[in-house]
Amino acid sequence: MRVRPGASRARVGGRYGTGSDAALVVSVTARAVDGAATAAALTAVAKAFAVAPYRVALVSGARSRTKILDVDLDQGSGEARLAALLDT
């Protein structure tokens, strides 16, 4: 996932990069101060995947725009939703 803090509106969708290494773009209105953008990104991803916020965990990248998340959901539906979000 690639976070874009300070956006005019929150949005989950699109690609950052190319090929199989492309990351999902998550734009959030929060600024990158004291973890606010990271927290907002986790909430936005939870909404985009239609899961409770506690089912989304940060694996790495707390202080980076590029983050790795663990979303606790069925693998098949998760992959399909991710593909749809990457293509928007």
Image (tube, rainbow, N blue to C red):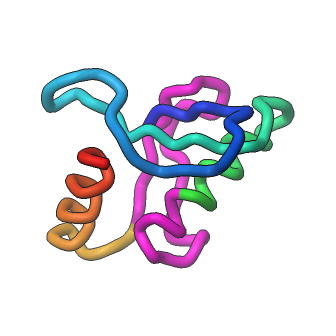
Is 64 inside the magenta-drawn segment?
yes
Q: In this view, does 24 lie to the left or right of 87?
A: right
The residue range painted magenta reads 45-71
> Does residue 72 sit above or below 6 in this rendering?
below
- In the image, 86 versus 8, the foreground residue is 8
Q: Establish if 51 lies above or below 35.
A: below
Side of 1 relative to 29 (left or right)? left
Q: From the top left corner, tell me how far across and down residue 13 is, in percent.
A: 40, 47
Q: Quadrant of the N terminus?
A: top left
Q: Residue at x 50, y 58 (%)?
A: 45
| Whole-percent x, y for residue 44 in the image | 58, 58
The picture places residue 40, in percent across and down from the top left corner, at: 69, 51
From the viewer's perspective, tell me whether residue 64 is left or right of residue 49.
Answer: right
Give the quadrant of residue 19. top left
Q: What residue is rendered at 15% in x and 31% in y?
A: 20
**Residue located farthest toward the front when viewing the structure as drawn:** 8
Q: Residue furthest right?
A: 34
Residue 79 appears in which quarter of the rendering? bottom left
Judging depth in this view, the residue of 50 and 72 nearest the camera is: 50
